Image (cartoon, rainbow, N blue to C red):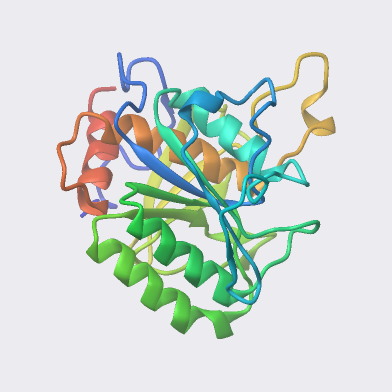
């Protein structure tokens, strides 16, 4: 486990010296969000695998248009991941329709579906502030971890605890606007691995940062991109412990 007494904790680190030559090749990532617009110029459609839509009632849809993003949120999340880990494969799991709202049952179903696809990482740039969802989400997270899947999710939103990001087995992500997008900090809080980074997605040329989407959703995406780079050289079976070790090892070379 990561040692919070280690002097490397809390220190910002730069991307170039951390994962030289790593592109995320061989890493599979389920992105549970609003889907993806595969024709968007920030998206490499050749690195997308078939995904699925999951309704609030748990209904599954694998049709041609099932994962088409109507909101732009999932597209921006996948773009941020692909920017850092261009050779990772992303599986869009659409749980949002025309609004950023879904159900706890849909999230649980999405996690189970992702694990069955033998992904290495699950990106949850979302979460619920309702603790009533914690028991079912905890069970789903436990199942994922037992299958060697690392879950990365928002730990809080606006200072309010967020689930499943607050669950101990999840790599929780928090915002720190003072950290550049090429950096992150890693620490432990209440025995859980917590990573902080900036909350900006991939920049749009000519558009000011604050006119684009921003927030903890994109901090989660940045961390997932870093995690894909860290996992690339690790032989299967992969697990959260091996990922945390790789991220810590990156600090030690600084």
Instruction: Indicate whether 102 appears above or below 11.
Output: below
Q: Is residue 119 left or right of residue 223?
A: left
Can residue 193 be seen here? The reply is no
Q: Position of residue 126 (x, y in %)?
A: 61, 57
Q: How many marks?
A: 0
Instruction: Indicate whether 220 appears above or below 56.
Output: above
Instruction: Indicate whether 200 appears above or below 154.
Output: above
Report the residue at 32% width, 63% height from top.
144
Query: Which quarter of the image is occupied by the N terminus?
Result: bottom left
Q: Position of residue 72 (x, y in %)?
A: 74, 41
Query: Which quarter of the image is occupied by the C terminus?
Result: top left
Using the rendered view, name the quadrant where residue 230 is placed.
top left
Q: Position of residue 170 (x, y in %)?
A: 39, 60
Can residue 118 be seen here? The reply is yes
Using the rendered view, name the quadrant where residue 198 is placed.
top right
Q: Position of residue 160 (x, y in %)?
A: 64, 68
Using the rendered view, name the quadrant where residue 12 is placed.
top left
Report the residue at 32% width, 46% height from top.
120
């Amino acid at each position: 486990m990561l040692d919070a007494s280690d002097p490397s904790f809390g220190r910002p680190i730069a991307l170039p010296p951390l994962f030289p030559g790593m592109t995320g090749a061989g890493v599979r990532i389920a992105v549970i969000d609003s889907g993806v617009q595969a024709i968007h110029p920030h998206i490499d459609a050749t690195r997308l695998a078939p995904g699925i839509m999951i309704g609030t009632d748990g209904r599954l849809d694998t049709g041609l248009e099932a994962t088409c993003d109507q909101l732009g949120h999932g597209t921006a999340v996948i773009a941020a991941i692909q920017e850092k880990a261009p050779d990772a494969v992303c599986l869009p799991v659409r749980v949002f329709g025309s609004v950023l709202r879904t159900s706890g049952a849909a999230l649980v179903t999405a996690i189970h579906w992702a694990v069955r696809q033998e992904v290495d990482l699950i990106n949850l740039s979302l979460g619920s502030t309702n603790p009533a969802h914690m028991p079912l989400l905890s069970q789903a997270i436990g199942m994922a971890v037992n299958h060697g899947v690392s879950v990365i999710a928002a730990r809080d939103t606006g200072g309010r605890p967020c689930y499943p990001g607050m669950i101990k087995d999840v790599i929780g992500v928090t915002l720190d606007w003072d950290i550049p997008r090429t950096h992150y900090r890693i620490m432990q809080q209440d025995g859980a691995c917590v990573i902080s980074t900036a909350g900006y997605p991939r920049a749009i040329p000519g558009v000011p940062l604050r006119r684009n989407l921003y927030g903890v959703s994109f901090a989660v995406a940045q961390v997932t991109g870093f995690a894909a780079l860290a996992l690339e050289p690790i032989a299967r079976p992969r697990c959260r412990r091996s990922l945390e070790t790789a991220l810590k090892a990156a600090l030690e070379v600084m």
